[in-house]
Image: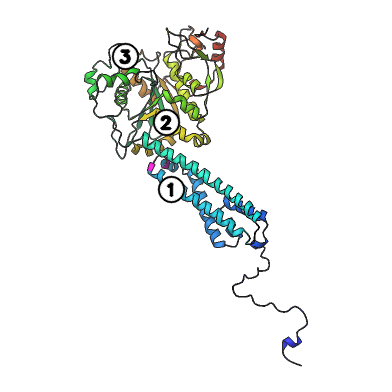
Amino acid sequence: MSDDPDVTRPIGDAPSLPPVPGSQAAPERGDRRRRPEERSLGAVLGLTVANAVVPGTAFLASGRRRVGAVVLVLFALLVAGGVWLATAGRRTAVRLAVDSTYLNWVVAGLAVLAVAWVAVVVTGYRSLLPRRSSAPRHAVGAVLVALLVAGIAYPAYRVGEVAVAQRGLIDGLFADDRESATVEDTPDPFGDQERVNVLLLGGDGGEGREGVRTDTVIVASIATETGETTLISLPRNLEDLPFPADSPLAAIYPEGFESGSESESLLNSVYRNGPADHPDVLGPTDDPGADFLKLGVGEALGLDIDYFVLVNLDGFSRLVDALGGITVNVNYYVPINGITGQELPDDYIAPGPNQHMDGYTALQFARGRYGLTDYDRMDRQRCTIKAIIDEADPITLLDQYQELAATTQDIVSTDIPRSALDDFVDLAFLVKDADIRSVVFDTSLIDPAYPDYDLMRQIVQDAFVGSAGPAAPAPAPGTNASGAEVPNGSPPVPVEGADPAADVRDACAYDPAQAQAALDQGKPPTRNG
């Protein structure tokens, strides 16, 4: 007998031979990962889609674990960054959006990210695909990969378009080379100010109109610590606008603004007539009319007006149409066109809740004045602004942003410097959660023809400290303080002695009693009968 074990070995399976050098080692027991040659077409396509949604999964499934882990970690960091920007980092995100330099980096980063994502999808698919695949399998896989690549590239392209449009808006609206006679561009624009005062102007410039009249004049006074905002509305027919004693305008208008006739000396004519009568009196400036108004309105209210924003209603309808329309409440008949005392309106917007309006109708709603008062129109304009803000949801903004940005550049001008944008971002986040009150200088508070500017300054200061007295009861719908009817069922003139500061939302709410009173009176006459 031999001691050699091979001689006495029982008949059975031969021992496994060692693997051939360079060949793939057999999978360990319990390893359920399938080799590429064993994967079905459905599994390859499913993993490819998963890899497009969660980059890195295809590499993990094909055995390229290190590559898959690196890609997956990078993707997780990207998602975490996006979630942070959308939540706790929203202020940072908005600051990035108002900085044209950062926007350039955003565009470049989007391009790099899109290319990297596409590369991950393509290489991941190739790592999953069996070496010996039929032509039909290749064709189906190629179609899927092409669709996934398009699904990555198109959104990146659209977001890039938005970033480019935003950069153009920032560069155009807040140009570095803009000159102002009332603004000094400093690194710390707000400094230690308790309030920032912004003059909001609505101009009526457009086809067939000579120059720009500012029929809407509102000061937004914002507390820098809390964001508490007071909107102060001035009537378009305010007379004798004063100017600061240290301004060259005080010597020219010692008794207040005057430009010939009474109608050309009203507040809404200062923007146009002041610079026309006295060009270059304030020195180099790109918008002398706005500087005239900033100085005059500031003196009238006892405030230093820091900046202005002018919205020209000529392009207003384009803005509303780009948003897909707005929805407002209508409590009385609002005229469409018409000139008081000369020409009847073409038609009326009837009372009713939640009325959806296109650009043209919204413009008429904001502008209509036939048979009504300037104060009625001032209320509707504030409601229109509120409706635009409510309508501007993220999906609409993203889809229509190029048109919105182009329209904004056409209809908006301002002297806010680029250096102040970060501070305004911080302020905007405070304003969002703060109270907004409105002071309307109507005939219950002042006589526009003979305004008491000392009283106006006191009312403004009282509104800031909340010392206004209790509100008197409002008159019945369709009447004024004396009980007389008012046209079109329009809002009553406020009772004298009422609280001048009120919640800005009140005028925009639907009032069924007032609307029904207007409907009961019937539609007013029009040019067509």
* Circle 2: residue type: Thr
Examine the rendering and report whether any part of residue 280 can be seen. yes
Q: Is residue 97 magenta?
A: yes
Residue at label 1?
Answer: 108
Tell me: residue 428, above or below residue 134.
Answer: above
Tell me: residue 5, above or below residue 517.
Answer: below
Tell me: residue 506, above or below residue 49.
Answer: above
Q: Is residue 123 magenta?
A: no
Residue at left offset 61%, top offset 58%: 128
Residue at label 2?
Answer: 408
Dot 3 surroundings within 10 Å: few (below 14), some, or many (20 or more)?
Answer: some
Q: Are the residues flagged by discs 1 and 2 in contact, CB closer than 8 Å?
A: no
Q: Looking at this rendering, what residue extends furthest in the bottom direction?
A: 1
Tell me: residue 399, above or below residue 207.
Answer: below
* Magenta region: 96-100
Residue at label 3?
Answer: 264
Could you say which is closer to the camera, residue 440 or residue 518? 518
Q: Nearer the viewer, mark 1 or mark 3?
A: 1
Q: Position of residue 385 (x, y in %)?
A: 46, 26
* Circle 1: residue type: Ala
Q: Position of residue 435 (x, y in %)?
A: 45, 29
For marks 2 and 3, the one nearer the N-term is 3
Identify the main secondary structure in magenta: helix
